Image (cartoon, helix red, strand yellow):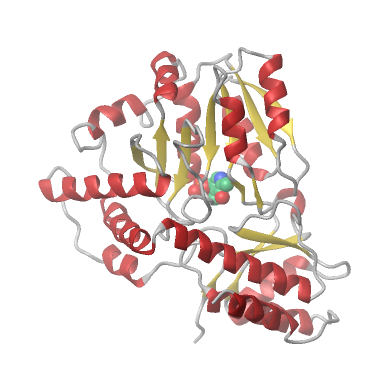
Amino acid sequence: MKKNYLLTPGPTPLPPQVCEALGRPIIHHRTPQFQALLKEASEGLKYVYQTKQDVFILASSGTGVMEAAAVNLLSPQDTVITVQGGKFGERWTEICSAYGINTEIINVEWGKAVEPKAIKERLKANPKIKAVFTTLCETSTGVASDIKAIGEVVKDTEAVLVVDAISGLGAIDLQTDAWFCDVVICGSQKGLMLPPGLGFISVSSKAWELIENSKCPKYYFDLKEAKKALDKTDTPFTPAITLIIALCEALKMMKQDGLANIFLRHRKMAEATRKAVKALGLELFAPTAASDVVTAVCVPKDLDGEKLVKVMRDTYAVTIAGGQSELKGKVFRIAHMGFIEEFDIIAGISCLEKVLSQMGYDFVLGAGVKAAEEEFLKNT
Ligand SMILES: *Cc1c(COP(=O)(O)O)cnc(C)c1O
């Protein structure tokens, strides 16, 4: 028998309150009972999103809601900017291309954050650009973008700003309204402490204007239908009832903690993780733009990075993530978002040390745990 530690950037561990809600008997969705829950969930999401706009709840993984954003805002042959500094930025380009939308790609070196200036210049060069697709936390590299600065750049143009905040929302600050984010997308299985299966999307009035004129094909993900339904506290199709009940519990917890405390907790865990791996002589993959959501660490030369992740998981039941695409085998990623706490990080670092030691990596045993503990002590 082994106790599992889940330190992956989605899914993340579930709090007991959420697990309990997931085990409740199903109820029917066209009832006052469910309507009250849908209302509670929608209001709670506005708190987490820091918005007064509607936030729609769709039954889908995060990527489905990314697709919903593209097909609702745009028409084939429209031109948009996509910011590509990792696997999830690339996904924006792939989704747009699938619908015949032209993409002007801003390529960013993996591990670096996009310069808002680069977006500004592209927008200036082509005033026909309809949307700018960005990522709050590029989960494949651990990099956080300066969405506030990007919002300042996009707000005075015709384009709308679309933010993939799937892994960052509810972990690091994202002020949807104050930062002029027109469309913000999230998924349930990362900072929001739920199983996968729900996607969320906020829509500004500037974005609704585009939606009115969009000609991309859509049916299930038609946001106009979603709005008609939500105005009556309803959904166009059968919602993921149980997940929405669990969402209410997760949102209750987040409201009780307060966003400021939640962000501070993520900051502490990230800082402790960064200090710990550095104390082990390891290098951060994104030293200049590291997010407080997930930390990507370079695998030292001569070490098998995939084996490291595999042994931690299969032998000790501590699951971290490896690298994706071009970073496969080159980095490992430790998540510190959602229902992950101080002592989960300590356990993760401890296991990392154990396996590094077994693999013959040269370091002072305990140095990582010590550095993490010192960081946590500093902040209490
Ligand atoms: C996880 C993630 C996605 C993909 O979400 P799915 O729920 O797997 O579809 C997209 N973007 C970012 C930044 C993510 O972290």
The reply to whether residue 240 is in sight is: no
Q: In the image, what residue occupies the spot 47% across and 25% down?
A: 71
Q: Is residue 297 above or below residue 123?
A: below
Q: Quadrant of residue 301?
A: bottom right
Q: Nearer the viewer, residue 280 or 72?
A: 280
Q: In the image, what residue occupies the spot 34% across and 58% down?
A: 255
Q: In the image, what residue occupies the spot 56% across and 19% down?
A: 130
Image location (x, y in percent) of residue 127: 63, 13
The reply to whether residue 56 is in sight is: yes
Q: Nearer the viewer, residue 163 or 18?
A: 163
Q: Nearer the viewer, residue 114 or 196?
A: 114
Q: Nearer the viewer, residue 153 or 33?
A: 153
**Left or right: 219 with respect to 97?**
left
Image location (x, y in percent) of residue 183: 47, 33
Image location (x, y in percent) of residue 377: 59, 80
Work out which quarter of the rendered image holds the C terminus and state it.
bottom right
Q: Is residue 192 above or below residue 134?
A: below
The residue sitting at the left extreme is 32
**Left or right: 67 with respect to 308?**
left
Task: Please give the count of numbered marks on the rendered protein.
Answer: 0
Q: Quadrant of residue 152?
A: top right
